[in-house]
Every structure is written in structure tokens, then in C-alpha cells.
Image (tube, rainbow, N blue to C red):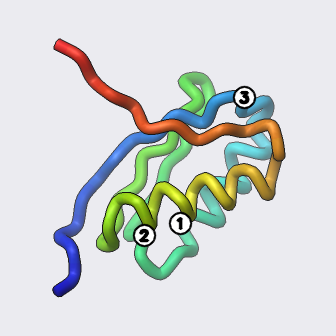
Amino acid sequence: MQPPTQTKTYLLKNLCCAHCADAIEREVSALASAQGAQVDYPNKTITVTFDVDEETMFNSIATIASEIDEDIVTQAITQTI
């Protein structure tokens, strides 16, 4: 059974330029399991809608980001109330 579609936002720590942000957005958007991705360069985040388990998507984003710039660290964003 396929996981339900979900949307998550992740931090792209050390994202240094708009060119890298565009490249990450383009490559994540091209993943078969991603219905869309948007990088917010000023806030250094990526929001992605996907239909695989979250760990798989997180690992895909982290791999893509670090291949584009080895200094980028992908982190889950936890919300506190």
C-alpha cells in the first residue's frame, strides 16, 4: 500500500546561493515521487509534496542537496507550541 500524499518542509542549512536553491528545486521536483517542490531561498527551506514514506523523501532531498553543495545539511523542522 502506497503512503498517502503529504507535504513537508525541511531546512536547508548552509544554503548559500539562489543558483543552488534553483538546482535543488529542479532536481527534487523531477523525482517520480514528488508532486511538487518549492525552495524558499531567504528562509533556506524546501517544501515538497510527495507520495512515498517521509524517510525516503528526506533522504532523497538530503542526497540531492549535498551533491549540489557539500556544505548543505538537510534537517527536519520540528514545531513547538
Q: Residue at x 57, y 74 (%)?
A: 30
> For the residue labelled by badge 2, is the local secondary structure a helix, a strand or a loop?
strand
Where residue 42 sits in the image (x, y, percent)?
Answer: 60, 24
Image quadrant containing the N terminus: bottom left
- Measured Cα–Cα span from mark 2 to mark 1: 6 Å
Question: In the image shown, does 62 or 5 lie closer to the viewer?
Answer: 62
Instruction: Point out residue 12 in the picture as x, y percentages from the top left corner.
Output: 60, 36
Residue 14's disc is 3
Q: Residue at (80%, 37%) from the top-left corner? A: 71
Quadrant where the image shows the C terminus: top left
Query: Crowding at label 2, few (<14), some or many (≥20) Cα neighbours within 10 Å?
Result: some
Per the image, label 1 sits on a secondary structure element best described as helix
Is the C-beta separation of discs 2 and 1 under 8 Å? yes
Quickly name the residue at label 2.
34
Lateral position of residue 79 relative to residue 10, left or right: left
Calculate the distance from the C-alpha at mark 2 to the C-alpha at mark 3.
23 Å
3 over 54 or under it: above or below: below
Three-letter code, disc 1: Ser
Residues under labels 1 and 3: Cα distance? 21 Å
Query: Which of the two discs, 2 and 3, sits closer to the camera?
Result: 3
Q: Amino acid at mark 2?
A: Ala
Amino acid at dot 3: Asn
Tell me: residue 14, above or below residue 59.
above
> Badges 2 and 3: C-beta atoms under 8 Å apart?
no
Residue contact between numbered discs 1 and 3, judged by CB atoms under 8 Å: no
Q: Position of residue 10 (x, y in %)?
A: 46, 40
Percent of width and height locating residue 69: 82, 46
Q: Which residue is mark 1?
A: 29
Above/below status of 77 relative to 50? above
Q: Residue placed farthest to the top in the image?
A: 81
